[in-house]
Amino acid sequence: MQSIINKRVIIFYSGLSVGFTPKVANMVDAAKSAGLDVVLMALVRKPSKVSTVQYHEFCFDSNIKAVKFLKLTWMIIRALVFIMTTRCSVIYSINPLAGFLATLCKKNNVKKVYETHEIFPGVRYKSFSGSFRHIWIGIERFVMNRADRVYATDPFRMKFLRRFYKVSAEKFDYILNAPRSKKIENILRASSTVVHYPDIAEYRKRNLKVISYCGGVQRDRGIEAIISAVAEFNSDTPSVLYIVGGLEQGYGQELIELANECGLDRIYFTGAVDNENLLKYMSLSDITFALYARDTVNNRLCSPNKIFDAIQCNVSLIASYSPLAKLISSHFSSIFLVKKVAVPDLVTALKALSQSVDGVHKKIEVARSQYSWEQYEPKLLDAFLKI
């Protein structure tokens, strides 16, 4: 392997926020530990604090559409100028807008790597669907076919995207959204003595099942069904539910009212937490969720990092059916798949997992090394070194 000392790489992310994308942090850590000079760029709606690496953020958030458009245009220009004036040997861009800007920059002897975190031809996001869909399909096809290497987040998404965009198999691969196992181990070690999470220690003493939802509190994640299912499950098996994640003001109030209607009094809404604290809540749970409405290609081929987080955290998981989830769950009884997000299905899953939860952790322990970031880090370093 060639020397990588003093070799500079730009990791360029576009999306909601770097802070909500732990995979980017894993990429940065891997590159730094290998001796690379790393520059992290982010064209995002929400700002983040990053102190571990040279970080350049281009934020365009605004509540006024016209202002947001003007800010986005200005930030795109600034990002282009930054790329053109920054010496590097590899640009690793993530998601279509970052990939498009990186591809537009013609720099001699600079390799271009592209990774997509979604199936953008099959999402419902306003800015990527409707009349915008064909524009973004054209952009992503342009990016993929000009990249030196392309990555998806799992083998099933890779296969779909490779065929959809007609990209050669030789340059298309995947890197799972798996967490770094050593980091999880440190969190688990710290969590064993945590006392400031509301009443968890007391609930455990009383043998209540601790159930959590950890992630984006969005309308298509089945949270209403989770609350109703836990309320029904609670009538037979005493339990407590934690909703861990930021709440939109209107939607949060709807969930609180639903919990009151269901008579679910042991429920906590934590509000927004960073990824480390989110994992702490998950690790203190008996059962957690990763649910998606099966109304888009992106969701039907979902690739949730929560599957890998649950495995690493020794937590049983109720997940929506997808090819990736089916592959993993076929080896581990700690994962219960549901084909639709409906209250009866979730109650059945809760009952099944609550009966087997004490026996699944030995199986999960075997899976830790197989589904950890460390297994896929060499692919990332290959992208920096061998293309």
Image: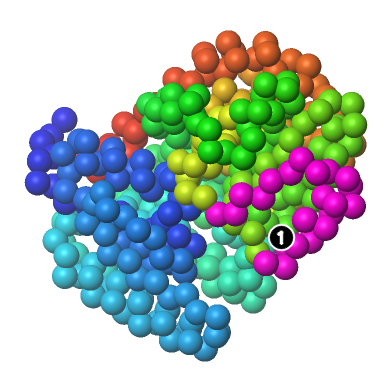
Locate residue 199, reporting x and y percent: 64, 35
Report the side of 11 relative to 296 (left or right): left
Locate residue 142, reporting x and y percent: 43, 64
Q: Which residue is mark 1?
A: 252
Give the structural element (helix, strand or loop) at label 1.
helix
Q: Nearer the viewer, residue 302 or 236?
A: 236
Report the side of 56 relative to 45 (left or right): left
Q: Nearer the viewer, residue 102 or 321?
A: 321
In the image, residue 168 sits, relative to residue 316, either above or below, namely below
Disc 1 marks which amino acid?
Gly
Report the side of 175 relative to 286 (left or right): left
Question: Can residue 295 be seen here?
Answer: no
Report the side of 343 relative to 93 (left or right): right
Which residue is rendered at x = 71% and y = 60% of the image? 252
Q: Quadrant of the N terminus?
A: top left
Question: Can residue 220 be seen here?
Answer: yes
In the image, residue 97 sits, relative to residue 10, either above or below, namely below
Residue segment shown in magenta: 249-272
Among the 4 quarters of the image, the one containing residue 85: bottom left
Q: Is residue 339 magenta?
A: no
In the image, residue 361 sits, relative to residue 159, either above or below, namely above
Which residue is rendered at x = 41% and y = 56% of the image? 18
Q: Quadrant of the C terminus?
A: top left
Q: Nearer the viewer, residue 160 or 194?
A: 194
Locate residue 72, reporting x and y percent: 42, 79
Which residue is rendered at x = 55% and y = 80% of the image? 63
Which residue is rendered at x = 43% and y = 86% of the image? 70
Locate residue 295, reporting x and y percent: 75, 54
